Amino acid sequence: MAIKATGAEIILNVLKDQGVDTLFGYPGGAVLPIYDAIYQQNHINHYLVRHEQGATHAAEGYARSTGKVGCVLVTSGPGATNAITGIADALLDSIPMIVITGQVGTPLIGTDAFQEADIVGITRSCSKHNYLVRNVEDLERVMHEAFYIASSGRPGPVVIDVPKDVQFAEYEYTGELVNEHKTYKPIIDGAPDAIAEAIKLIKNAKKPIFYTGGGVINSGPEASEALREFVELTGAPVTSTLMGLGAYPASGDKWLNMLGMHGSYEANMAMHDCDVMICVGARFDDRITGRIDAFAPHCKKIHIDIDPSSINKIIQVDVPIVGDVKSVLTDMIKLWKAGNCSKTQPSLKPWFKEIDAWRARNSFAYNKTDDVIAPQYAIERLYELTKDQDTYITTEVGQHQMWAAQHYKFDEPNRWMTSGGLGTMGYGLPAALGVQVAHPDALVIDIAGEGSIQMCMQEMATAMQFGLPIKIFILNNERLGMVRQWQQLLHGERYSATYSESIPDFVIMAQAFGCLGLRVSDPAKLDDTIKEMMAYNGPVLVDVEVEKHANCLPMIPSGAVHNEMILEDVLADVEVSDAGKRLV
Amino acid sequence: MQDNQHTLSILVDNEAGVLARVIGLFSARGYNIESLTVSEIDQATNMSRITVVTSGNEKIITQIKQQIVRLVPVHSVVDLSLGEASVEREMALVKVAGVGQKRVEALRLADAFRAHTVDAAVDSFIFEITGRTDKVTQFINLMKPLGLVEASRTGIAATSRGAEAVHAE
């Protein structure tokens, strides 16, 4: 039965009916009516961040670790523009998110009013969809539609801009859920003939490989289960993009580690030499492919993706399958079993013999010394000491992120939160807050660099206010390491603006926020410091002073091919083509 | 792969900002717009048709279509340049000023091109010409030495030949 409600109440009613109990936000003039409505209800917990960018990343961490939609509420103008980075981040990493922005009253729109910004204009190219709700009659429908669009198909951020007078206006609230849209109709099931063709290729393959991505995680835990089953049935090796880590367990015997620019030797060599590639929920990003005209030249390519525009965007494939990963893999498993394909397929032993030779190169190896902590060693110890706990890892962006991806092993999906597509420094700390809100009893660790952590470090106050015991694990090399590495490789060791003359004393900074601050520089004391971090019931920041000039290896330099990886620390001798230098 | 001109017919929900979404996509992804026409086509169903002429090789055109379809308010996209089965027309208003022999010649040519005179003064004409783009261009070029002041072109409207609707449900 319809009830009379204000626009602000309609917004909260929809959130409640959509099962939302968590909102990350920051108040301001244009959202006062919504904040007033929040004050008068008990269903939705609002987490006050310290900067709107933090709200969006927290919502991303919440969404990525639960599979639910992350929700953000910010005010008009600067509140909304501060949220842009997180919205763009969620678009590139396909994270379901709802961002409600306040807007000046409808009579003031277009007059350059106080705190007015054209947010639907600004977010048009960095959101999956957006709305300006000019009439309260449309608000309930738009809100439900937004949830449907954000969470279905290829997930993404949807922005709803609500003018202040619409928040005050009254209308009937019906409470009817919307699960369809007249023009937006995502494709879930793959075409049977394409699936049959794919199975035919896989069952005859001598050197198959699964190349999996964030789409497997987005498709839900059952998609990861299906992937594991199909890998077992086919016996093919698996590699994954940065975004897909955990879908197939790192402890699995078919695991080749991550592929791409800082991926493993075995993964990249196997991608280059395979005869059938099964791309599952990944999009042939430039970090993965290296030089496109020489990418995996000898194979037939199968591409499973829910977004038709991903197909043939970068790499021409032989068998495109548009559909949801879970549905398509389930159909493939059925067909594989029905055809008894495991019995008739060629032996993959020669293929794994080649792979084992590549594995033997031990491409993630690094120099370990007794006097200084190698950054890779810090991650390794962190993994060893936390692996038996209910642990979630977030990262910032840079060398530490790649080292975390290489050396922290994920056996389950939704445990790894990182900014892959946009590469947003400042993501990890607020994302950890979002994860901790969703999993109050879990161990949530933000693996950070001393550069990235300074981009959103104000959120330590949020951690304190809401009692969120996140752990911040900084690999501090006093340099913007990844940029420094590229300057060493591509710009004649001219280290322009990558050394910070002034870095805060992180231990005192942590204490200033009320958190525990720890510092370690002796490899022998690393374990005890990590244990102390884990034992403390509250937010902790650990400043790990690591080797200052370590490079992130292995590496496929820009413009190079998968089988031209740099393995040893010989960056100075590497020739990069002029075309390669122009790439990011 | 060779670059070719393609005429895309895009059926959209006539909602605020829908044109900005479509053309924003072209600029953000670096595609060309050579001609653009947009108008409401059915008030009852609240639909508009956007006709875009763009160019690119087969791979790029396919990608453009996929990206457009991904926009939430888009019903469908049809490439009218596939095959020979479409009709494309453009209209222009051409203002020509002059007296004496040039004025007579402009009128004679307008007649030859089946252009209508929609405004006439003692020292100027406005011609309305409809036809294929190359015909309109040719007419405007001919008017240049005869006192062309300006031309206002509509861009291309297009539909498929035969009884079928372009955007069949």
Image (cartoon, rainbow, N blue to C red):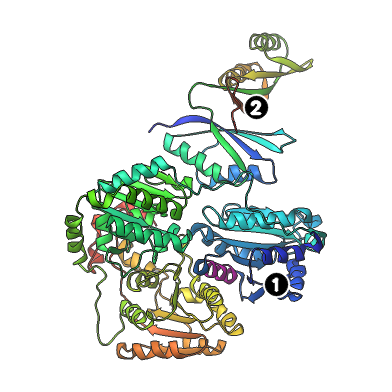
Q: Position of residue A581 (x, y in %)?
A: 34, 55
Q: Residue at x 52, y 70 (%)?
A: A61
Q: Which residue is mark 2?
A: B153
For the residue pair A288 and A151, the one nearer the viewer reads as A151
Q: Horizontal placement of A359 versus A189: left or right?
A: left
Q: Which residues are magenta?
A: A53-63
For the residue pair B90 and A496, the one nearer the viewer reads as B90
Q: Which residue is mark 1?
A: A27
Look at the image and say whether residue A393 sits in the magenta stretch: no
Residue B94: image quadrant is top right
Q: Chain of mark 1?
A: A
- Location of residue A78 with respect to B84 vertically, above or below: below
Check if mark 2's residue and mark 1's residue have beta carbons within 8 Å. Answer: no
> What's under tag 1, amino acid-wise?
Pro
Q: Residue at x 53, y 28 (%)?
A: B80
Q: Position of residue B36 (x, y in %)?
A: 61, 34
Question: Can see residue A314?
Answer: yes
Q: Position of residue A8 (x, y in %)?
A: 76, 65
